[in-house]
Image (cartoon, grey):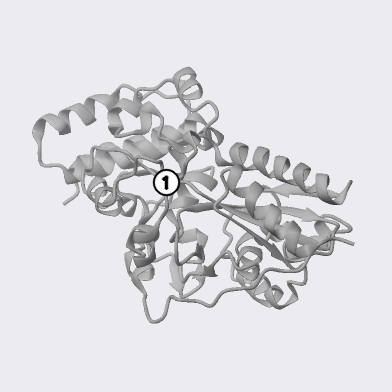
């Protein structure tokens, strides 16, 4: 028999030693979440992420993904760098108002979180085996058809915010989630109540109104979707709304009052890379493919490839060309864009031409 109290206590201790902020245990019966998942897919809110429809209800059925799963160990890990100042939200809003400065989502400025969490979840699972003996398990972090927020919510790591992300009273939403599916029957940790109340700050802050209703996100309007998940051309209507955001978007989190409690990570993995601390659009635009691969080695950014990187930068440079009133900056942007006018990719060329045309837009 497993001493459940002792195991949970050990999980918390080991988790903290591995850099996790909180550990929980979720049940595997997620049947009450299935109607919402099916409705979201039926409305096409997943956009071109066809794998979501392909996996269907597997996402809500842990034992269908990993046969024999009886419980899910959940984990969250704070990712704000240790040197993040108290007024970080104000600083990030200010960056969005400087059109020639590139804005990369906070979570992507350091090492790829998939690598960081996966390795540590594996270590945690191995430590569990020192108490319970050999067990069947699989570790995940945003890497398989898993209802991560649902599992985290049911295990007490927080509650689902109206922007659909998990919120925690002591840490806001600036953290990653991970799971270990195990073939052990563990006692679930207690779920928490929602504390969003009547607040709709995240809905109001979304630059593209992608949060179509509380707890409902239409990926087809989300800047994170267009800059990261989508492979082809970005619809012209969305381009002006992207501003200088070249990889992801944090606006709904910047607006959330709970993020004044966001915690810093003790891990150096999430410290921003030198090239991503306060980069200019032009500096990043000048990376050739070899430089892109070198500077993004071990980073989540690398997965979009150099072509999409240039596509996103072209949109941001077009927005900067339209918004800036400084003649010298306009000249620099025009000159930089023109240097890639013969790029091999038709997608890059089309976005580049759009960018150059923005100078004439009122």
Q: Which residue does the numbered mark 1 point to in the structure image? A: 80
Residue displayed at 83% across by 54% down:
66
Residue displayed at 41% across by 41% down:
81
- Position of 320 with respect to 303 (left or right) is left
Closest to the observer, 160 or 187? 187
Examine the rendered structure and indicate whether residue 116 appears above or below residue 237: above
Q: Is residue 58 visible?
A: no
Could you tell me how many numbered marks the image carries? 1
Q: Secondary structure at mark 1?
A: loop
Examine the rendered structure and indicate whether residue 122 appears above or below residue 155: above
Residue displayed at 9% across by 33% down:
327
Examine the rendered structure and indicate whether residue 45 appears above or below residue 66: below
Closest to the observer, 341 or 264? 264
Residue displayed at 62% across by 43% down:
117
Q: Residue 169 location in percent, x, y?
A: 45, 67
- Say which quadrant the N terminus sits in: bottom right
Q: Residue 48 location in percent, x, y?
A: 59, 54
Examine the image and state in which quarter residue 74 appears: bottom right
Q: Is residue 275 visible?
A: yes
Q: Residue 351 location in percent, x, y?
A: 38, 39
Examine the image and state in which quarter residue 286 appears: top left
Q: Residue 138 location in percent, x, y?
A: 78, 48
- Position of 20 with respect to 26 (left or right) is left
Q: Which residue lies most toward the bottom here?
A: 198
Examine the image and state in which quarter residue 56 appears: bottom right
Specify few, some or many for label 1: CA neighbours under 10 Å numbering under 14, 14-19, or 20 or more: many
Examine the rendered structure and indicate whether residue 295 appears above or below residue 62: above
Closest to the observer, 310 or 345? 310
């Amino acid at each position: 028999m497993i001493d459940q109290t002792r195991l949970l206590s050990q999980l918390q201790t080991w988790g903290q030693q591995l850099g996790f902020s909180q550990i929980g245990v979720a049940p595997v019966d997620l049947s009450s979440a299935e109607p919402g998942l099916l409705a979201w897919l039926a409305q096409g809110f997943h956009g071109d992420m066809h794998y979501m429809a392909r996996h269907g209800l597997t996402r809500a059925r842990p034992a269908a993904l990993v046969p024999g799963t009886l419980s899910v160990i959940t984990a969250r890990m704070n990712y704000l760098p240790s040197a993040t100042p108290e007024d970080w939200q104000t600083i990030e809003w200010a960056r969005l108002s400087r059109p020639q400065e590139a804005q990369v989502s906070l979570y992507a400025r350091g090492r790829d979180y998939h690598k960081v969490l996966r390795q540590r979840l594996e270590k945690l699972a191995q430590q569990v085996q020192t108490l319970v003996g050999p067990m069947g398990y699989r570790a995940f972090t945003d890497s398989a058809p898993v209802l991560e927020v649902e599992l985290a919510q049911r295990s007490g790591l927080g509650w689902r915010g109206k922007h659909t992300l998990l919120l925690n009273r002591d840490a806001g939403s600036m953290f990653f989630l991970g799971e270990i599916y195990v073939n052990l029957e563990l006692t679930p940790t207690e779920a928490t109540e929602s504390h969003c109340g009547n607040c709709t700050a995240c809905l109001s802050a979304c630059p593209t109104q992608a949060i179509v209703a509380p707890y409902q996100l239409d990926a087809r309007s989300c800047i994170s979707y267009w800059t990261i998940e989508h492979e082809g051309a970005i619809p012209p209507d969305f381009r002006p709304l992207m501003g200088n955001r070249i990889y992801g978007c944090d606006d709904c989190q910047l607006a959330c009052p709970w993020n004044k409690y966001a915690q810093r990570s003790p891990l150096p993995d999430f410290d921003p890379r030198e090239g991503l601390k306060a980069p200019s659009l032009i500096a990043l635009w000048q990376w050739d493919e070899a430089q892109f691969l070198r500077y993004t080695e071990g980073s989540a950014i690398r997965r979009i490839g150099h072509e999409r990187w240039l596509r996103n930068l072209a949109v941001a440079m077009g927005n900067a060309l339209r918004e800036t009133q400084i003649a010298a900056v306009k000249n620099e942007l025009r000159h930089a864009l023109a240097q890639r006018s013969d790029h091999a990719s038709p997608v890059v060329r089309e976005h580049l031409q759009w960018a150059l045309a923005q100078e004439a837009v009122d």
